[in-house]
């Protein structure tokens, strides 16, 4: 699918979220109160141009430098700009000039709305498959986010490789996207409407895991997922028998992560100090760590907490001196075989 087709679909065909023909590019997930409050301050024109499929606001963002891939009209950029505060910065990249025009028009509005002395956001026109062509310094971002956009990229591997290059060591890519339960046929992938609706560009979920690992992101972690319903009989018949889901993953840039969850007899204790998470910390769909509880973890999970911005919020027990074999019970099954919200007993 050519870039021009996507630019036309999001810049000209879609004038608002009501123009979408499926529910793929929407966010029905339960939204935390602190994020609702922030979004209530975002300009109406920016909100009406939102086409995301998930929530891409991880916790503990104060002072962070964040990059939004495929930022569109800037809803997530501005929400994140409130969360990072004046000491942080959020950079948006998008290939559609019409969307960026809306985003740039409201920088002063949002700086004032969030009580900042000056705007802490910037926007770049470019392709997320060609991040190396933009004026962005390598290893300069703490977090990279993306909301229902990677599926629109012509080279998904290039996106993830570029993201890995731009992240600081210990940084993470935290993003939502659409995935298919099998590889999308070529004829379907060439359907411009299905592509623009974030369906026919979707990766087969297992291919995504392989591409992520090959791009330097060992041990991708599924955070949330939900099945997508195509509430348009004509489009539903065109994609059958494929099934789709929206999923949020977090990918850490940690060089020592292992291919599997290995047991070193380690554990962590959450201090309850992450803002908006006083009772439990959710790392992914099978790590919900209660305050004060000794929580056994595999070596990879240990590093995802110990070697990232989350370290100050935990006490760490053990080390890597003794290996006890595989950590039994970890995830990795197809998300299509799980009910949404299902927890897996794991490290």
Image: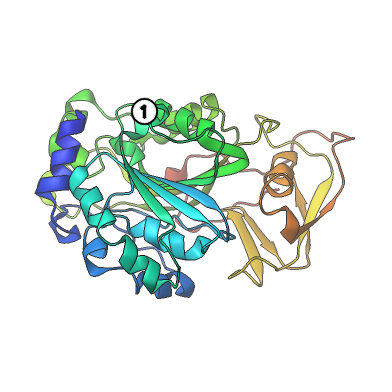
In the depicted view, which residue is nearer to us: 83 or 200? 83
Determine whether, in the image, residue 343 is placed left or right of residue 10: right
Would you identify the image quadrant in which residue 184 lies?
top left
Residue 322: percent from left, percent from top: 89, 35
Q: For the residue carrying disc 1, how many other residues have a C-alpha within 10 Å: few (<14), some (14-19), or many (20+)?
A: few
Residue 62: percent from left, percent from top: 57, 61
Q: Secondary structure at mark 1?
A: helix
- Name the residue at 47% across, 58% down: 57
Would you identify the image quadrant in which residue 130 lies?
top left
Above/below status of 284 relative to 166: below
Residue 280: percent from left, percent from top: 65, 66
Q: Say how many tags the image has.
A: 1
Task: Say if residue 187 shows up in the picture.
Answer: yes
The residue that mark 1 highlights is: 130
In the depicted view, which residue is nearer to us: 18 or 98? 98
- Name the residue at 71% across, 44% down: 307
- Name the residue at 13% across, 40% down: 8
Determine whether, in the image, residue 229 is placed left or right of residue 206: left
In the depicted view, which residue is nearer to us: 74 or 263? 74
Determine whether, in the image, residue 345 is placed left or right of residue 49: right
State the quadrant of the N terminus. Answer: top left
Task: Say if residue 206 shows up in the picture.
Answer: no
Give the residue furthest to the right. Answer: 321
Residue 129: percent from left, percent from top: 36, 29
Would you identify the image quadrant in which residue 312 lies?
bottom right
Above/below status of 3 relative to 283: above
Determine whether, in the image, residue 255 is placed left or right of residue 340: right
Q: How is the image coloured?
A: rainbow
């Amino acid at each position: 699918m050519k870039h021009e087709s996507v630019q036309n679909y999001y810049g000209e065909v879609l004038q608002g979220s009501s123009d979408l023909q499926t529910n793929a590019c929407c966010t029905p997930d339960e939204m935390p109160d602190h994020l609702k409050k922030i979004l209530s301050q975002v300009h109406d024109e920016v909100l009406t141009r939102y086409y995301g499929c998930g929530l891409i606001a991880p916790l503990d963002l104060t002072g962070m430098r964040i990059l939004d891939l495929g930022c569109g009209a800037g809803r997530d950029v501005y929400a994140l700009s409130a969360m990072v505060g004046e000491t942080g910065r959020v950079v948006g990249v998008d290939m559609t000039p019409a969307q960026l025009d809306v985003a740039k028009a409201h920088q002063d509005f949002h700086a004032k709305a969030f009580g900042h002395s000056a705007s802490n956001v910037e926007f770049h026109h470019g392709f997320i498959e060609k991040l190396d062509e933009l004026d962005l310094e390598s290893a300069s971002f703490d977090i990279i986010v993306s909301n229902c956009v990677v599926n629109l990229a012509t080279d998904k591997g290039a996106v993830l490789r570029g993201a890995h290059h731009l992240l600081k060591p210990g940084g993470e890519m935290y993003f939502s996207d659409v995935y298919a339960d099998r590889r999308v046929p070529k004829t379907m992938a060439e359907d411009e409407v299905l592509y623009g609706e974030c369906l026919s560009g979707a990766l087969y979920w297992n291919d995504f895991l392989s591409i992520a690992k090959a791009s330097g992101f060992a041990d991708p972690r599924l955070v949330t997922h939900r099945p997508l319903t195509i509430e348009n009989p004509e489009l539903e018949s065109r994609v059958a028998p494929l099934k789709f889901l929206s999923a949020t993953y977090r990918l850490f840039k940690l060089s020592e992560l292992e291919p599997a969850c290995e047991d070193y007899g380690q554990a962590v204790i959450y201090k309850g100090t992450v803002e908006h998470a006083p009772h439990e910390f959710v790392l992914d769909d099978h790590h919900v760590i209660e305050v004060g509880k000794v929580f056994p973890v595999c070596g990879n999970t240990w590093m995802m907490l110990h070697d990232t911005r989350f370290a100050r919020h935990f006490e760490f027990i053990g080390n890597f001196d003794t290996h006890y074999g595989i950590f039994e019970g970890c995830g990795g099954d197809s998300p299509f075989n799980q009910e949404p919200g299902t927890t897996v007993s794991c490290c």
